[in-house]
Amino acid sequence: MSQINTQVDVDSVNRIAILGAESSGKSLLAEALAQQYKTVWVPEYLREFVDAQQRVPKEDEQLLIARTQMEREHAAAQHANAWLFCDTTPMMTALYSRHYFGRVAPALEDLEQEHDYDFTLVTAPDFPWTADGLQRESAAVRQRVHDDLLTLLEQRDIPFLLVEGSLKKRVEQVEFALNFLLG
């Protein structure tokens, strides 16, 4: 996260959730959009957690990860320039909790239900799958998580844009959508 503005009315910041399975380009897209819109983005805390702990999180650490992600999002909003691009949300933490542990802690489920973003992007799993040490499992898991995410968004009636193709094409798709929907 880089600092752009020092005083921002956080209520005027458009928060954009960027969701997707592992190795689907969320971080690349968030960073590229932040550069395009001259603002900040919120990196995925899970990546930092895994790097620091040198292991994947345990079930009882899922809530900490989601809360830390939200705290960083709120802090970044103070420095955003109209737009804040969020590389994941508690919804993804809850989805992975269901996938790996078969359940979601009630407090994490509450955070997941608060999905309150101005727009939601979903990155298609069409980037080549790349192993990333401890955090990434396989292309098959990536596809399963992607399918589960689409189902969850549809069940919850959360509108989203599925972005596909190269990074350049994804940025163009997002620009068109944001200009049309929120411009």
Image: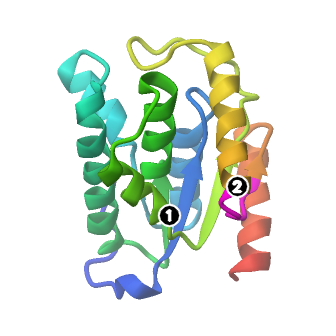
Q: Closer to the camera, 157 or 4? A: 157
Residue drawn at (72%, 45%) of the image:
151
Q: Amino acid at mark 1?
A: His
Q: Position of residue 167 (x, y in %)?
A: 70, 41
Foreground: disc 1 or disc 2: 2
Q: Closer to the camera, 47 or 160? A: 160
Residue drawn at (23%, 44%) of the image:
64
Secondary structure mainly formed by the magenta segment: loop
Per the rendered image, the range of residues in magenta is 155-161
Residue 40 in sight here:
yes
Distance CA(mark 1)–CA(mark 2): 13 Å
Q: Position of residue 57 (x, y in %)?
A: 29, 25
Residue 43, label in figure: none
Q: Residue 180, located in which quarter of the rendered image?
A: bottom right
Compared to 102, does 117 lie above or below?
below
Q: Amino acid at mark 2?
A: Gln
Left or right: 143, with 11 as reference point:
right
Left or right: 89, with 168 as reference point:
left
Residue 155, label in figure: 2
Residue 89 in sight here:
no
Q: Residue 161, located in which quarter of the rendered image?
A: bottom right
Q: Judging from the image, what secondary structure is the residue with disc 1 in?
A: loop
Provide the residue designation for mark 1: 115
Compared to 9, does 117 lie above or below?
above
Decide: few, some or many residues near mark 1? Use Cα within 10 Å; few <14, some 14-19, many ≥20: some
Q: Position of residue 9 (x, y in %)?
A: 35, 88
Mark 2 or mark 1, which is nearer the start of the sequence? 1
| Residue 38 part of the magenta-drawn span | no
